[in-house]
Image (spheres, rainbow, N blue to C red):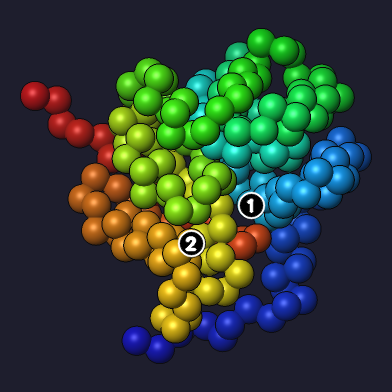
Amino acid sequence: MPNTTAPIKTASWSYAESFVVEDEILAAARSRAEEVGVTPVGSGVGAALRFLASVLDARAVVEIGTGTGVSGLWLLRGMRADGVLTTVDIEAEHQRLAKETFTEAGIPGNRARTIAGAGLDVLPRLTDGHYDLVFCDGDKREYAAYLKEALRLLRPGGIVAFDNALWHDRVADPAQRDEETVAIRDLGRSILEHEALVPVLLPVGDGLLAAKKEWAPEA
């Protein structure tokens, strides 16, 4: 079917990305990310994550890919005041920098639990059905495995979200067949076909794929 609207222009995309303005703390976190070679989420994705956490009134959130705390701070700012972010990253140094970001933002230490390790080593140790939101920004080749773990970790009505869902315009191009692109493309298909998920693909940043875990009827 033809599009009902014309494709968004670059100026409009840029306007939307910067609609929610980042403060100096997030700017400092981005500077740290550049220094250590980390690519954080864009401001549009960050604003979307804060929005989702706020709508969910999230008390417990899991993040795969701490970086220097950009996405984590966006999430924490959307969560309820007693909410706890569990953030996982294979690089302990990145998490040290993220803690600096959280401290500068006035986030109490007990609200951000950092775990150094690979996502697929850490996720199986977390509690079933305990989390409101799972945000994945780790190894793209492991996205399908993250989804499987997220479905176990999320409470009914919770949301799983994946960054880089458009992967630099490669996912929409069927000629692109590299391992990461195929993994993200297959993830989208799996989410679309999953009967217990309500999906949406948002063209913010490099793409944010999100899905709500449906409430299951009680036995």
Whether residue 203 is situated above or below residue 76 in the rendered picture: below
Q: Quadrant of residue 219?
A: top left
Label 2: which residue? Answer: 180
Structural crowding at the residue carrying mark 2, measured as other residues with C-alpha within 10 Å and reported as few (<14), some (14–19) or many (≥20): some
Label 2 secondary element? helix
For the residues bearing labels 1 and 2, Cβ distance under 8 angstroms: no
Q: Quadrant of the N terminus?
A: bottom left
**Residue in the foreground of this view, choosing between 164 and 11:** 164
Q: Residue 130: x percent and y percent? A: 39, 20
Placement of 20 over or under 149, stated as above or below: below
Residue 214, located in which quarter of the rendered image?
top left
Q: Describe residue 138's horizontal placement relative to residue 187 as left or right.
A: right
Q: Which mark is residue 45?
A: 1
Which tag is nearer the camera, tag 1 or tag 2? 2
Point out the residue furthest to the top here: 110
- Residue closer to the observer: 117 or 47: 117
Which element type, helix, strand or loop, lies under badge 1? helix
Camera sees residue 194: yes
Q: Nearer the viewer, residue 43 or 96?
A: 96
Position in image of residue 100 (x %, y %): 83, 25
The residue sitting at 48% across, 62% down in the picture is: 180
- Residue 216 shown left or right of residue 5 in the figure: left
**Which quadrant would residue 91 be assigned to in this image?**
top right
Q: Position of residue 119 (x, y in %)?
A: 49, 34
Q: Is residue 132 left or right of residue 86?
A: left
Q: Is residue 132 visible?
A: no
The amino acid type of the residue labelled 2 equals Glu
Q: List x then y, in percent, for residue 79.
A: 60, 27
What residue is shown at x 37% (from left), y 25% (from top)?
A: 124
Q: Earlier in the sequence, mark 1 or mark 2?
A: 1
Position of residue 63 in the picture relative to residue 93 (left or right): left
Amino acid type, callout 1? Val
